[in-house]
Image: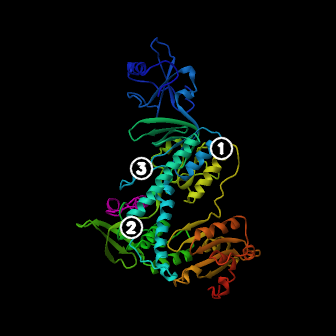
Amino acid sequence: MWGGGDYTPASLTCLVSGSGQTTCTPSLPPACWGMCGHPIPSQDGTSSLTLYHIGNCGLLGSRPRLLLVLPSQSLPLTPAGRQCYDLLVIGGGSGGLACAKEAAQLGKKVAVVDYVEPSPRGTRWGLGGTCVNVGCIPKKLMHQAALLGGMIHDASHYGWKVAQPPHDWGKMAEAVQNHVKSLNWGHRVQLQDRKVKYFNFKASFVNPHMVCGVSKGGEETLLSADHIVIATGGRPRYPTHIEGALEYGITSDDIFWLKESPGKTLVVGASYVALECAGFLTGLGLDTTVMIRSVPLRAFDQQMASLVTEHMAVHGTRILRGCTPLRVERLSDGRLQVIWVDLASDKKDTGTFDTVLWAVGRVPETRGLNLEKAGVRTNPNTQKILVDAQEATSVPHIYAIGDVAEGRPELTPTAIMAGRLLAQRLCSRSSDLMDYDNVPTTVFTPLEYGCVGLSEEEAVARHGEERVEVYHAYYKPLEFVVPERDASQCYIKMVCLREPPQLVLGLHFLGPNAGEVTQGFALGIKCGASYQHVMRTVGIHPTCAEEVAKLRISKRSGLDPTVTGC
């Protein structure tokens, strides 16, 4: 990297190799982007040049990897000698792209650095982050494919003479992957339209204002910025303590990019990722088992979580509770043998599968960033970045948003909104902070579970059992009636304060189109809706959503909450 005069790389080589050593002079002012300054003589013997190196000042007996020579009087560095931006975003996922595009639209000079390390199985993808490539988008499409299988079964009851055809995984996967690739391209176009510079390389901090990026070919590029946003997200965790887990297993980073059907599958984990994947695999006609060590959907309302897994078990997913894998081995026929133990009885058992999918949590993508060189602090237990209400890290001009930040929901929409609001604050267009309360979400299991606000357990813990009222109902969706579908797990509950006007603390909906239902009621709850407000809302008939506006029976009453009539 060169700049600030007519000095050539050849003259630099001569100057540095003349003595073989350079001496660090801490008293000299550093460059605006934090490198140490080393005065070295020019060829006429005067001290008119300053050497800048990347890294610590210990250059005795060694040559720095990257050098910049400038006339000493030219400090601070000029834009001609570096790539400098108002805002640099590390991470090309939902939150990072939203922040970058918003800032660029508001007139800032912005760059995005993004690089995807291939999964242990070699899966790689393009710009857009987890949601676009290996998360929300392909998951929802495969969930829809599974739902269509159920609709084909229902069709005969409605007079359609349709045979149940076998599912073609390859065709589905190609369609899903083509859509994902179109989104990758769309993000590239949007960045170009907004004049956001995109770099496809792995980034790490050099100092608080500078990042070094390394391309696939090993080329290094330096970028500096007034403000830096870390939005690198997370990746699936491999249980490396289990023999064969890394060698033979896959994760959600791989399942959506398989060209061929995974066949008989063991899904290990109790997270929403585990249950969603197991749900659509079962719906596509595959023999699927879920192995749960403790409780499913730990972060969610536990009554609802029980109903979710109960529905899955009734509709074909085998669930092994209280079990954990001990070892995975590859058999001579290529299949995988899994040995596990029942934690209650200490009894070991064995099963044979075509695929083992690990869904045992995620880890933040922070370890390769050299955060210590920037002074950014992380939680030593989770490795997530510590942030304040303004998304600022321990270094005031460095921010973190999305899954990589400590205490934030691992949800795409929250990362997007947090990114946009942060960009607006950095551009002095707004002082609004991201509000992480009452964030709605949906678990796309075969029977979808949508929720917003507090779980029943959280409400009782926060307010006390005597101050909480729960209204609930078991209902049957009209579309379930003709095909005589089982609706035993279709359930709604609204968690409220008992004291009038009974502020709604949380809503939990289990049934078809749960995301669509929950999104609408989330607005009301965000605005402070009370139980009385909901009861005065006219329902749309006949819908599942109207059942929320008809919740009249409380748990405290002990009455049967089953809805009868239309």
**90, 461: nearer the viewer:** 90
Q: Which amino acid does label 3 sit on?
A: Glu
Q: What stretch is highlighted in magenta?
A: 236-258
**Among numbered discs 3 and 2, the one appearing first in the sequence:** 3
How far, Cα to Cα, is label 3 from label 2? Answer: 30 Å
On the image, numbered disc 1 is attached to which residue? Answer: 426
Mark 3, other Cα within 10 Å: few <14 / some 14–19 / many ≥20? few
Residue at the far right: name it.
500
Magenta portion: prevailing SS class: loop
Determine whether the residue tagged by mark 2 lies in a helix, strand or loop.
Answer: loop
Q: Which of marks 1 and 2 is in front?
A: 2
Q: Residue at x 61, y 68 (%)?
A: 516
How far, Cα to Cα, is label 1 from label 2? Answer: 49 Å
Determine whether the residue tagged by mark 1 lies in a helix, strand or loop.
Answer: helix
On the image, numbered disc 2 is attached to which residue? Answer: 168
Numbered badge on residue 117: 3
Residue 243 located within the stretch drawn in magenta:
yes
Can see residue 401?
yes
